[in-house]
């Protein structure tokens, strides 16, 4: 276990913010370009009802909480408005991405030593490369973030090959997150299934489709970070491997690709995980066994979930070597997203 005399940096790779200035900017976008609001989306609006408004919308309050928890740097992302666009909206997707990226870049300037951000683009729409380049080179974005589906379209879609080719050539890491309201959701549910199951299911579905489409064989240098300790996919790897080995996957067309190796072997190579919302030492231990300590990143999903200290404590209570603890808490994120966080010197006893 890491000695208490050493102060370890902590990078939270999974952070969000939404404030009134952004909402005002997005209000200029015509509402007809967005998919209709389903009843389930009304439930989504209640997801943050237990979170203080200032904590969700005020970056100064967030940084204060971050400091209190001992987090060195938080990495902000906001891909969500793009996931709600109707297909084939064209240039408006580029406009929204620019609004989102400019907003986060501005937020980061308030606390540049304590914050960074990941830029977003709409991978299905034209102009993604130009906006990604602008964000990475001019705005200072440290990587890219996508949602795991876009209006019922998944990330294995063959039309996304130009995007994946760009990401590999640019050598940029990507953080995936489910949409707030996946378009395939049931119209209503009396339980909070959206938060508990539907969003993780979106992550698992998109990841499985990416693997079985041969995406990581065509683009072997892609680096993808899954949220929520893989959102449950760890428990399905045996099933995926069995289906692959027995050729029990019913391919829709003869031209559909298949992965070149067992699905589980992409974990810990192309695929990383962050630990936000795992809330379980057993889940963290399982992630370490499956992905390896060099492919597990610390994250919280704050302020959607406010328990930063609890999530740090879960990692620190495990019987980890000093090297493993540092990899998880900061080094993996630092290396993958080039965050320039420096190791802390030993603190006085």
Image: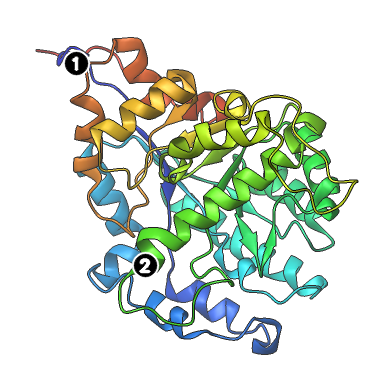
In the shown orientation, is residue 265 left or right of residue 32?
Answer: left
- Asked if residue 124 shows in the view, the reply is yes
- As drawn, the label of residue 193 is 2
- Asked if residue 177 shows in the view, the reply is no
* 139 relative to 258, above or below: below
Q: Nearer the viewer, residue 197 or 79?
A: 197
Alpha carbon distance from label 2 to label 1: 44 Å
Of circles 2 and 1, which is in front? 2
Q: Nearer the viewer, residue 126 or 219?
A: 219
Image quarter (top left, top right, bottom left or bottom right) of the N terminus: top left
- As drawn, the label of residue 347 is 1
Residue 272 placement (x, y as % from top left): 53, 32
Which residue is the extreme one toward the left?
349
Q: Residue at x 78, y 56 (%)?
A: 128
Tag 1's secondary structure?
A: loop
Residue 177 placement (x, y as % from top left): 52, 53
């Amino acid at each position: 276990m890491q000695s208490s005399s050493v102060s370890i940096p902590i990078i939270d790779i999974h952070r969000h913010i939404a404030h009134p200035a952004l909402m005002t900017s997005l209000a200029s976008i015509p509402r007809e370009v967005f998919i209709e609001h389903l009843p389930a989306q009304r439930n989504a609006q209640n997801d943050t009802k237990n979170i203080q408004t200032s904590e969700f919308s005020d970056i100064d309050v967030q940084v204060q909480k971050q400091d209190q928890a001992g987090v060195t740097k938080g990495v902000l992302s906001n891909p969500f408005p793009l996931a709600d666009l109707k297909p084939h909206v064209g240039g408006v997707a580029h406009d929204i991405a620019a609004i989102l990226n400019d907003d986060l870049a501005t937020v980061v300037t308030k606390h540049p030593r304590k914050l960074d951000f990941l830029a977003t683009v709409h991978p299905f729409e034209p102009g993604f490369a130009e906006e990604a380049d602008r964000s990475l080179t001019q705005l200072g974005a440290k990587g890219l973030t996508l949602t795991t589906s876009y209006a019922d379209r998944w990330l294995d879609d063959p039309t996304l090959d130009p995007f994946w080719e760009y990401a590999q050539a640019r050598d940029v890491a990507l953080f995936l997150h489910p949409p707030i309201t996946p378009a395939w959701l049931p119209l209503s549910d009396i339980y909070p299934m959206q938060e508990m199951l539907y969003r993780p299911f979106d992550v698992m579905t998109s990841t499985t489709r990416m693997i079985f489409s041969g995406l990581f064989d065509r683009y072997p240098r892609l680096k993808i970070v899954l949220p929520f300790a893989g959102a449950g996919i760890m428990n399905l790897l045996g099933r995926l491997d069995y289906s692959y080995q027995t050729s029990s996957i019913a391919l829709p067309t003869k031209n559909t690709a298949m992965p070149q190796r067992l699905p589980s072997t992409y974990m810990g190579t192309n695929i990383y995980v962050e630990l936000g919302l795992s809330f379980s030492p057993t889940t963290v231990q399982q992630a370490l066994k499956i992905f390896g300590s060099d492919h597990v990143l610390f994250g919280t999903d704050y302020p959607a979930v406010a328990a930063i200290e609890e999530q740090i404590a879960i990692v620190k209570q495990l019987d980890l070597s000093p090297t493993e603890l540092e990899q998880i808490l900061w080094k993996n994120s630092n290396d993958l997203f080039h965050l320039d966080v420096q190791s802390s010197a030993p603190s006085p006893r």
